[in-house]
């Protein structure tokens, strides 16, 4: 479906601002997103000579378009959650919890194991969120780690890891955007300049090892210590006949077949390089992996009578029904992002500010980081943000005297895009992290925002240094010192 974009100036900022403000004030995401979406359609319709009726019609046209564009994602999530429920009902999750209790006996070890698993699953951020949440939630529940803390660890080791992993769908997406200026080699060069990803991983490790928190997260952790959230986990995981293998094997098959599926769909077995193949259509490959996990569960559970064929199908339906609420949020957020990018020119308006600035070139990485963060936070998409900014950055840096700033500024672009996506209430990664942890979505946003913003502020300082020194190491070292110092001060004040 074709949409024609018009430039609406500062009005293009209203839809995401309205949606985010309402979501934070009302704690209700569905109506907030829809009101933001519809306000964007009203701006588009009235600015282009349309009517109220055309605004309503275009709203549902956009939703239809986004559902169509993301059909594989919807199918993948449905199949994945079917596997999740089946694994839980088989008793595999409970058996894994009993086994893990022998090794993960402290809150520190459980938190670190969660972060380590998040780092290891680096192929796709959405897959990371749901898989890590499903596997680790029973353990963190038993050790009274709050769902908010679990959601933060999941979210902070999803996109930040994927954006610096050379073999991931993210790497290929970025490399394709800079194909004319060096492609994959340029992407590799941006890794040390991606201060937000690197410092976020450091912060996660610090929080996991020390167990110290501040702000809303500290209150969530204190509440979890008093609450019996393990009882809920136990209620969710009935199946005393299950074994650890009933959890591990379907998930392992799913992961392996997801990687092979991405390679197959992308043409790896026909001669395309592996790194290019997995980025061609990653959600289609992930869908194949999820289906393989479903088949594995069937072969393992039915012959051993862990469940009857009827119960197997009922659990599949139950898993799919569980994904409907977050899926509705995804569809509305996709549609809101579509309005901003495709109809009213939010990205064009913000990007124009970058091109019109007359600041010294050394400020460019800092400025781009801030602009990318605002865009990604407003639209809830890191890919859409760096997709719009990278061409502008390459054009700016192609001018006389700015060539040396290309890699630092591209690193800042990716870092700002990930930060905005990391803490935006309308980001699909944020939604999937809260879903994987079974945490209320707005609570995840509220508790994560201070952590992510602390890292972002320190990154801004790092990019001021990198822009004038043209090396990542001084800014990164300064960022490490500032982050650890800030955490120690904040934890001391909240002691």
Image: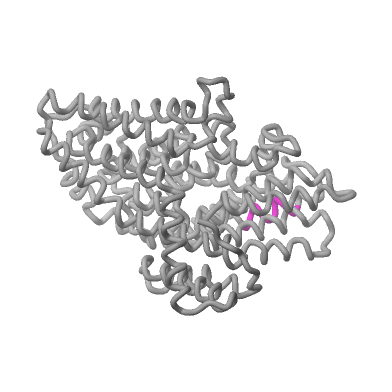
Residue 460 in magenta? yes
Q: Quadrant of residue 72?
A: top left
Q: Residue at x 50, y 76 (%)?
A: 42
Q: Quadrant of residue 189?
A: top right
Depth check, front residue: 345 or 51 = 51
Depth check, front residue: 280 or 135 = 280
Q: Residue at x 25, y 44 (%)?
A: 142
Q: Quadrant of residue 100?
A: top left
Q: Residue at x 53, y 77 (%)?
A: 50
Q: Residue furthest right?
A: 400
Main SS, magenta residues: helix
Depth check, front residue: 360 or 345 = 345
Residue 18 in magenta? no
Horizontal arrangement in the rendering, residue 327 relative to residue 421 (left or right): left
Measured as percent of width and height from the top left, residue 237 is found at 18, 41
Horizontal arrangement in the rendering, residue 373 relative to residue 438 (left or right): right
Horizontal arrangement in the rendering, residue 364 relative to residue 39 (left or right): right
Whether residue 39 can be seen here: yes
Horizontal arrangement in the rendering, residue 315 relative to residue 114 (left or right): left
Q: Which residues are magenta?
A: 457-464
Depth check, front residue: 364 or 216 = 364
Q: Residue at x 69, y 35 (%)?
A: 183
Measured as percent of width and height from the top left, residue 182 is found at 74, 35
Measured as percent of width and height from the top left, residue 414 is found at 63, 47
Q: Quadrant of the C terminus?
A: bottom left
Q: Is residue 470 above or below residue 59?
A: above
Measured as percent of width and height from the top left, residue 71 is found at 40, 47
Whether residue 217 can be seen here: no
Q: Is residue 219 above or below residue 241?
A: below
């Amino acid at each position: 479906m074709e949409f024609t974009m018009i430039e609406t100036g500062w009005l293009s900022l209203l839809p995401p601002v309205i949606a985010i403000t309402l979501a934070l004030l009302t704690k209700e995401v569905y109506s907030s997103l829809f009101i933001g979406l519809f306000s964007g359609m009203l701006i588009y319709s009235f600015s282009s000579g349309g009517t109220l009726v055309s605004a309503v019609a275009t709203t549902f046209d956009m939703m239809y378009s986004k559902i169509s564009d993301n059909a594989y994602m919807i199918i993948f999530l449905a199949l994945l959650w079917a596997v999740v429920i089946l694994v839980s009902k088989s008793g595999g999750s409970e058996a894994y919890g009993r086994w893990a209790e022998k090794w993960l006996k402290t809150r520190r070890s459980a938190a670190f194991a969660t972060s380590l698993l998040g780092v290891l699953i680096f192929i796709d951020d959405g897959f990371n969120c749901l898989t890590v949440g499903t596997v680790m939630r029973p353990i963190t529940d038993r050790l009274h780690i709050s769902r908010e803390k679990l959601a933060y660890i999941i979210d902070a080791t999803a996109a930040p890891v994927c954006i610096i992993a050379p073999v991931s769908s993210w790497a290929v997406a970025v490399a394709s955007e800079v194909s004319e200026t060096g492609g994959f080699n340029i992407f590799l060069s941006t890794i040390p300049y991606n201060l937000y990803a690197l410092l976020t991983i450091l912060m996660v490790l610090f929080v996991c090892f020390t167990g110290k928190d501040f702000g809303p997260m500290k209150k969530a952790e204190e509440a979890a210590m008093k609450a019996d959230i393990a009882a809920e986990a136990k209620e969710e995981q009935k199946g005393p006949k299950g074994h650890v293998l009933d959890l591990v094997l379907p998930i392992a098959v799913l992961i392996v077949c997801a990687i092979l599926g991405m390679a197959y769909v992308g043409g790896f077995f026909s001669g395309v390089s592996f790194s290019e193949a997995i980025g061609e259509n990653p959600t289609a490959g992930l869908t194949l992996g999820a289906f393989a996990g479903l088949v594995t569960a069937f072969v393992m559970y039915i012959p051993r009578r862990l469940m009857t064929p009827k119960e197997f199908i009922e659990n599949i339906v139950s898993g799919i029904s569980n994904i409907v609420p977050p899926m509705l949020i995804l569809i509305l957020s996709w549609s809101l992002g579509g309005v901003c990018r495709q109809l009213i020119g939010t990205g064009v308006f913000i990007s124009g500010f970058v091109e019109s600035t007359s600041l010294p070139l050394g400020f460019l990485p800092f400025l781009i980081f801030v602009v990318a963060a605002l865009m990604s936070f407003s639209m809830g998409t890191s890919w859409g943000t760096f997709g719009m900014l990278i061409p502008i950055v390459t054009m700016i840096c192609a001018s006389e005297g700015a060539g040396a700033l290309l890699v630092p500024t591209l690193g800042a672009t990716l870092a700002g895009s990930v930060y905005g996506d990391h803490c935006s209430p309308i980001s699909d990664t944020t939604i999937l992290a809260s879903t994987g942890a079974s945490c209320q979505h707005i609570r995840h946003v509220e508790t994560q925002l201070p952590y992510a913003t602390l890292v972002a502020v320190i990154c801004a300082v790092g990019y001021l240094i990198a822009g004038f020194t043209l090396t990542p190491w001084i800014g990164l070292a300064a960022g490490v010192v500032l982050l650890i110092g800030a955490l120690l001060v904040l934890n001391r004040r909240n002691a």
